[in-house]
Image (cartoon, rainbow, N blue to C red):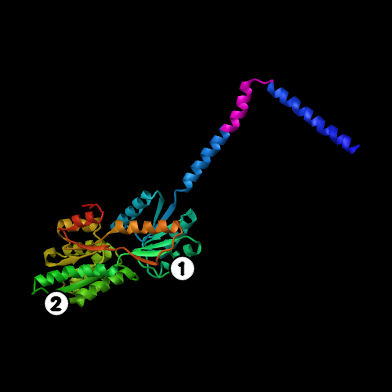
Amino acid sequence: MKAIHSSWRVLTALLLTAILVMSLAACGNSDMASTTQAPQAAQTENKTEATETAEDSETHLIGYSLNSMDSTMKTMADYFESVAREHGWEPVLLNANGDVATELNNMESLMNMGCEAVVIMGCDTAGSAAAIEELGAAGIPVIIAGRKIEAKEDSYYTYVAGDHHEAGKAQAGYLNGLLEKDPALELNVAFIYGQSGSSSVQQRYEGFESDCLNGQYADRVHLVASQYAEFDTQKAYDITTDMLTSYENINCFVTQSDEQASGIINAIKAKGGSLDDYIVVSIDCSTTGQSYLKSGELDATVLMAMRQLAVSSADYVEAALNGETVEKTNQVVGYYQLVTPETYVEVMKAAGMEPAV
């Protein structure tokens, strides 16, 4: 009996299906078209949305943590941003204003935004390590650019920079050239450092010390005074004012940024001195430095090829996104080059940088 009932159920289902098909066939063709087109349109919309989502996912969000936003770092930020966009990435740039706590907050913000890699120009050799290690623990590749930071080696992807000793050596080379030309010249040097606790600042000084203070003309070069100005124009101004009062024999200022050179130059003028009586040598060739080169108030500065650093940093971001393994330390060759009022335009253009002044 069960088999008979089952057979009747199957037969009934087949009959109902046939009746349904006949009923649909009686409907007009236009109704059938609308029935079939609606799912196709929906599929097309879904496919378009899926394609757009896939394309959006290819736009990598890349973070940049900068230690300040003076004229030098503003130029660096512009190069970071333009090079990132050349790669098709979306850059996010945050400024720590020289504060390690702010830097840590910025790095956490970049992580929370979903940045797939972060480039950092740190505030402090030791103090910036915590920010890097936090991102490293979260699996976000960190590229340390410009300034070495003493983070655990497994917490960052790579470190890329120029040889900072070369910056100091370039400054020394300029002064040695003056000493060679004038055997009667003696230099009483005031050295104004950049930021305390920065490895690049120390290395720049070491390069200057080895080639100038302890170099070929060491008997005619005397270090009279030195102090840190923390890459701050006003501090450099105040320090210079005090030095000019305390050491009347100073005739040469060597400093580590054009922002500080600005403070030095303006302090000399405020004291009623003539810049013709002083040699001022700096580092950066920033917009500020270029203006003083053009006016002849800055004798020489050392160009940082910032676009080259931005390009190299982007190359390592690309490598990290592709899962490649790279060396932990990488050098930007030719990053530092001496420039004078006569040469800065030509040297900048050769380095792929457009002079601002």
Instruction: Tell me if mark 1 has few (under 14), some (14-19) or many (20+) residues whose alpha carbon lies within 10 angstroms of its own.
Output: few
**Against 52, is 328 above or below?**
below
- Residue matched to label 2: 220
**Against 352, is 19 above or below?**
above
Left or right: residue 266 compared with residue 69: left
Q: Who comes first in sequence, dot 2 or dot 1?
A: 1
Amino acid on which disc 2 is placed:
Arg
Query: Where in the figure is residue 193, as x and y percent of width and height?
Result: 27, 69
Query: Where in the figure is residue 196, as x and y percent of width and height?
Result: 33, 70
Real-space Cα distance between discs 2 and 1? Answer: 47 Å
**Residue at disc 2, secondary structure:** helix
**Residue at disc 1, secondary structure:** helix
The segment highlighted magenta reads 26-40
Left or right: residue 86 compared with residue 1: left
- Residue matched to label 1: 154
Residue 77 position by quadrant: bottom left
